[in-house]
Image (tube, rainbow, N blue to C red):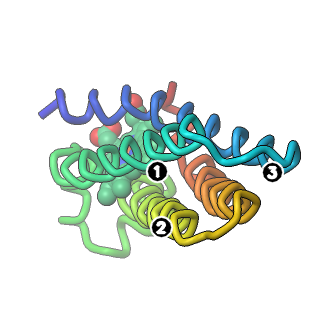
Amino acid sequence: MDIIISLHSRLAYAVLALLVLATLNAFWGLVGKRSFGNKDLRLSLFGLIFSHIQLLLGLITYFVSPYFSAWEGGMGAVMKDSTLRLYLVEHPTTNILAIVLITMGWSLHKRATTDRKKFFRIAVFYGVGILLLLSRIPWQNWP
Ligand code: HEM
């Protein structure tokens, strides 16, 4: 199942890059008072789709990862070890929350009636999402 873990690790570059681009683009659109066009829609949609694929891969990765067997030692053993806690608790929960926020941003932008609101909702929800993701990447092992 190394292939799944490796895919999850590689796709992370595309996911993070797309989300950063979509967020910066939304900020620029907001500041520059542009109208929300096709390019803006596509960039946000690609960010959403890639993060959902990464979420599914992450869920599979969780169960096939060598870290998973650490649960046999019980909750206490996982929580006491900062590496195990990061991989088995913090990274998954924070990243699921981040993707929920990104999905909310996407839905709310669709309901927005003005271009300003569309950019604002993408910028804020994707922006907070990406900060959460970055806060729980296992930086000591990646890239
Ligand atoms: C957009 C969301 C996510 C991003 C950007 C992301 C990114 C990453 C990165 C960069 C690594 C390190 C890979 C390496 O060491 O080479 C990793 C590992 C891991 N991720 Fe995620 N992840 C995301 C979501 C998730 C979710 C939702 C879960 C579980 C429900 C998850 C479970 C794991 C596990 C278990 C590992 C450790 C795999 C191993 O080395 O055995 N990830 N992730």
Distance between the alpha carbons at the discs numbered 3 and 1: 39 Å
Residue 80 in view of the camera:
no
Q: Nearer the viewer, residue 115 or 101?
A: 115
Q: Which residue is mark 2?
A: 107
In primary-sequence order, the first of circles 3 and 1 is: 3
Whole-percent x, y for residue 68 in the image: 23, 54
> Which quarter of the figure has residue 53?
top left
In primary-sequence order, the first of circles 3 and 2 is: 3
Q: Which residue is mark 1?
A: 83
Which residue: 43% across, 34% down?
Answer: 12
Distance between the alpha carbons at the discs numbered 3 and 2: 18 Å
Relative to 44, does residue 121 appear above or below in the rendering?
below
Q: Which residue is mark 3?
A: 30
Distance between the alpha carbons at the discs numbered 1 and 2: 35 Å
Relative side of 142 to 88, left or right: right
Classify mark 3: residues with Cα within 10 Å, few (<14), some (14-19) or many (20+): many
Residue 65 in view of the camera:
yes
| Quarter of the figure with the N terminus | top left
Relative side of 73 to 20, left or right: left
Q: Nearer the viewer, residue 128 or 143?
A: 128
Amino acid bearing label 1: Thr
Q: Is mark 2 within 8 Å of ligand 1?
A: no
Whole-percent x, y for residue 134 in the image: 61, 47
Which residue: 25% across, 45% down?
Answer: 57
In primary-sequence order, the first of circles 1 and 2 is: 1
Amino acid bearing label 3: Leu
